[in-house]
Image (cartoon, coloured by chain):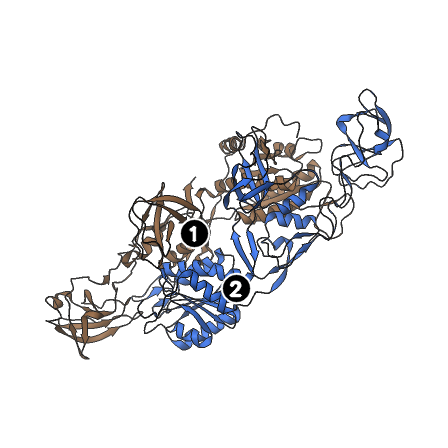
Chain colours: A blue, B brown
Amino acid sequence: MRGFKERMRVDDALKLYFEKANLKRLGSEKVDLLNAYNRVLSQDIVAKYDVPHFDRSAVDGYAVKAENTFGASTTNPILLRVVGSVEIGEKADFEIKDGEAVKIATGAPIPKGANAVVMLEYTNDLGEYVEILNAVSPFKNVSRRGEDVKAGEVVISKGEILQPQDIGILASLGVREVEVVKIPKIAVLTTGNELVELCEELEVGKIVNSNSPMICAAIKEIGCIPIPLGIAKDHPKEIKSKIEEGLRVADAVVITGGTSVGEKDYVSVVVKNLGNLIVHGVSMKPGMPTGLAVINGKPVLLLPGFPMAALLAFYTFMPKIVERLLGIKILKKKGEIIKAIAKRRIPSSSGIRTFARVIYKNGFVEPLRTSGSGIITSMIKANGLVVIEEDKEGIEEGEEVDVTLTRHLIKLL
Amino acid sequence: MRGFKERMRVDDALKLYFEKANLKRLGSEKVDLLNAYNRVLSQDIVAKYDVPHFDRSAVDGYAVKAENTFGASTTNPILLRVVGSVEIGEKADFEIKDGEAVKIATGAPIPKGANAVVMLEYTNDLGEYVEILNAVSPFKNVSRRGEDVKAGEVVISKGEILQPQDIGILASLGVREVEVVKIPKIAVLTTGNELVELCEELEVGKIVNSNSPMICAAIKEIGCIPIPLGIAKDHPKEIKSKIEEGLRVADAVVITGGTSVGEKDYVSVVVKNLGNLIVHGVSMKPGMPTGLAVINGKPVLLLPGFPMAALLAFYTFMPKIVERLLGIKILKKKGEIIKAIAKRRIPSSSGIRTFARVIYKNGFVEPLRTSGSGIITSMIKANGLVVIEEDKEGIEEGEEVDVTLTRHLIKLL
């Protein structure tokens, strides 16, 4: 540990590194929607068609001309002739005229000529005719084309990390492929004359290279692709050629061991010759002999050889470096539970566990309209969930609640 | 929503379901250690060899017979003949005799005949001879074979979800393959006459099957493998044959749509005929038309057709069902931050960010010895981290701290 001229604080090290490193952003690629879960969107997604993309019934009942029902009531039923029926999934390829009605299922398209639906409950089936017991105004019980999402609207923005609900939304909008940021590939090199690859019979004097499988697992854990480069002996030439290999095949390189300033610690010397070793020596324990470098715009992370120190320094620096490569900063993680104040009352019914979808922002939550026409819009806009237990009746305005985030809160870098 | 005879509370539904369902546990499989990250161990792992597996030097210095140094001091140096040197990674295939010493590097094996190491700082290199300026007792500065882990000890227990540090430990112990619980495969069926598979041009009356890609992504999110079964029209025969297909290829089946009790809601009828529909109708909003069934020991989850309801009901029930298939219950998740009381003082140095590895249990934390011989043991035993910021000097006994869990806390089921 002796020999480091200065040791920087963790936050100062990161600040200096990002100021000086000028890291290259990763490019993007097209992926099938079915493989897009957890990927970072590299462009806004624009709706290609209206949702709903046809006027459809919101209830089971009879599609009618609203004007034909004016004045109808239980004591004054109006008689309409039933000229057909439309089920969900069917096309309504006929037109209704004055005095006519069409039996219609929830979700089925409104036939031409009709502009409203009378709920089944307010009708009386007489076979060829139906009694209408309630007047409806135009567009009553009709989900109108485009009322949820209009073609051309941005539905999910660049930088979002696609969650299951996003995949659902994109499928509803007919999106088959999305443009996402590439997954960072991180090469892993371990150094040390004492190291041998994983084996069942160990010679005296030898130690298994456990850092490589460990760091490779940690790379998977943070959503990246590990590329093991094997072991380099403590020789500058061997270390140099392995680092160069790593830079060819990966977007970043992690090196464990030989990163201190001792006699056989060649890694920092080699890295300095290849690029810019911006930070060397960090005020953290364990993890002091950590270095942050850049070679040709690609990050190179020097980790101590001691396994726990290597892992802790990896977790301290690599996720933040990966954010730079992806171009986003994760402010809060999906699944995090945060306290917030309800901006408006959130209703619930006693005895029922209610999952209220909310927008969380700056310590406040606002419930979303979640029925009727706003189905997709509410899925797009919600970023949290407030769970109201069975024994509670609603959340009052101004009440503090626990919000579970349903997506990562991100910021573009 | 009408028609459900009774709606059960979420917790009651789960309780009843697990009491009655008698779900089949998943079997296990051998995987390469490099693919074992995040898998559930299905058997205890026993150390095959001692760690260290040879007596090794803990410092740079001279390996000696301790008895030869007795009485040595700065004013009374003892002269020993240097008969060789051992570097890290080398074998020491010579033996030292009385009056002899061997130059030795940290981590190198202690030569035969030697039983202690004098630190470089307490020696004077005279070429063929070395002056010993300090007496050492037997085994001073020696990490003894097996002092960290003894062959035959259980190092990681059945049910643990393997984290990067475990992969590192297992590699150190020469474990190439581990026996883990299989990854649950979950088949996904969507029902509805109005549904068509993802396409760019939608006919009037049709709706894209967005539930299947959405639920498949959620299955990936909870660490399982999705198997999409496509769409079944609202016909009992078609639904039945698709469910049977799902049961053949997967460990569980999820069905969305047609799960209520309306005219065309055939799913529950079909499921009842094939097995046992234990819960049908849950007091949750959205998500009421949810059902929990078992067919031939495999779980079948009936979800509403409305996307957000389907997703919320999936999250409410499926992770708990998957725990049963895996045979473990996750009590707290890795990464969770919990408050705890320090059982002992946790030291740190001012100006250095200290990552103290701790054991968290029942609201208390205990720091682990993390240097010297307990390296692997401490990695095995620690389940949390207490980060002590630069401006703080240690944590006092009895002080409340934030613990970040470094592994899932689990319980065998």
Q: Position of residue A17 (x, y in %)?
A: 46, 66
* Left/right of residue A308 with respect to residue A352 in the rendered view: left
Residue B42, horizontal then vertical, whole percent? 42, 47
- Who's the residue at 76% across and 28% down the image? A120
- Judging by the rendered image, the residue that carries numbered circle 1 is B162
Decide if residue B185 is on the left or right side of residue B346: right
Please tell me which residue lies in front, A316 or B60. Answer: A316
Answer above or below: position of A172 versus A233.
above
Amino acid type, label 2? Lys
Q: Is residue B228 visible?
A: no
Give the residue at x 67% y 42%.
A375
Query: Cα distance, mark 2 to mark 1?
Result: 22 Å
Taking A362 as reference, is B104 left or right?
Answer: left
Percent from the top left, x then y, of residue B385? 38, 51
Image point 68% across, 46% down: which residue? B209
Q: Which mark is residue A185?
A: 2
